[in-house]
Image (cartoon, rainbow, N blue to C red):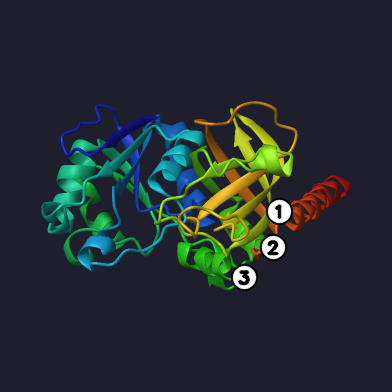
Amino acid sequence: MVYIEKTKDFQIQEPTVVTIGKFDGRHRGHQKLLGAMQEFKRKYHYRTAVFTFSVAPTDLVQGTRHTVITTNLERRNNLKKIGIDYLVEYPFTKEAAHMPAETFIREILAGKMGMKAIVVGPDCRFGYQRAGDARLLEELAPRYGYQLKVIEKEKDEDRDISSTYVREMLDLGQIEKANELLGEPYYIHGVVVHGNHIGEPVLGFPTANLCPPAKKHLPPFGVYVSETRIDGMVYKGVTNIGRKPTIKTKEGISPVGVETFVFDYHGDLYGKEIEVGLLHFIRPERKMSGMEELKGQIERDKEVARGFFADIVGD
């Protein structure tokens, strides 16, 4: 995948089928759009190209900071994994914020991105004051020489599947439901860092620590059955999300972290980029009386996780 970021000076030299959006979560609705792009690729041999902004426009326009299900790193990894050819993370500047919708179509999509087809949802909005929509794309298609395909929303019963819906389920701790909407486990990507070094010497087993960025939308603090992708392999495990209140640090309170015990993995994980997927909520995070109680609780958590995986195999 060709990844274009931090520049407005680029030119895709081959015909593309484009989609636009934040792709926060890459849920089943997003997957429906991306699947339609692959149909254009097979039929017309267009390259697939996703246009998004490096930061959410609402963050800068409204002066707020929203959390995201999918960080820029995770979005990049996800789109690369499914075979997208180009990902453009366009800088969101004052000029971009005030770009008229038709100018955006002419100069960016048809111009810089080589658009010969575009796939969007019925509620897509773009351009200054969100004036651009599917109707405008249809109106201007003959002028700028592209095909338009509007994909209806994917539904969960009577509700549209959206990033907002996924966030609600994460906030409620309904990880299985969130995963159902996503069409895959909720993942946290990151590079393994050094933790408090209590895993193997104190608890008897090594753990992998990630420090998610503040923008990452996390589920409730607690312990989860998890799966971890390492070098293309998937390992079962248990993950704690939170501040590890039992562990004393010099700073007093630990930063929010993601700590995973990976079953049956032997090797050094420090510095590796891994993906931790949450499958099932076991219990809330709580402070233990000491390390012995914590060690015993973790052993029970591991048994719950092994039982979870055994049930899946049994089904």
Residue 143 visible within the image: no
Q: CA distance from mark 1 to mark 2?
A: 8 Å
Q: Amino acid at mark 1?
A: Met
Labelled disc at residue 157: 3
At label 2, which amino acid type do we have?
Answer: Met
Residue 14 placement: quadrant: top left
Q: What number is the disc on residue 170?
A: none
Q: Is residue 289 above or below residue 119?
A: below
Count neighbours of disc 3 (C-alpha within 10 A) and say few if under 14, some if 14 to 19, many if 20 or more: few
Choose the circle earlier in sequence order: 1 or 3: 3
At label 2, counting other C-alpha atoms closer than 10 Å, the crowd grade (few under 14, some 14-19, many 20 or more) is some
**Residue 174, image x and y in percent?**
64, 66
Q: Nearer the viewer, residue 275 or 293?
A: 293
Nearer to me, 213 or 279: 213
Q: Residue furthest bottom?
A: 158
Q: Nearer the viewer, mark 3 or mark 2?
A: 2
Q: Are marks 1 and 2 in contact (CB under 8 Å)?
A: yes
Residue at 42 percent across and 57 percent down: it is: 68
How dense is the environment of label 1, judged by Cα within 10 Å: few (below 14), some, or many (20 and up)?
some
Kindly tell me whether residue 248 is visible in this rendering.
Answer: yes
Upstream in sequence: badge 3 or badge 2: 3
Residue drawn at the location 79% of the way across and 54% of the way down: 296
Q: CA distance from mark 1 to mark 3?
A: 46 Å
- Pointer 1 residue: 291
91 relative to 47, above or below: below
Mark 2 residue element: loop
Q: Which residue is mark 2?
A: 288
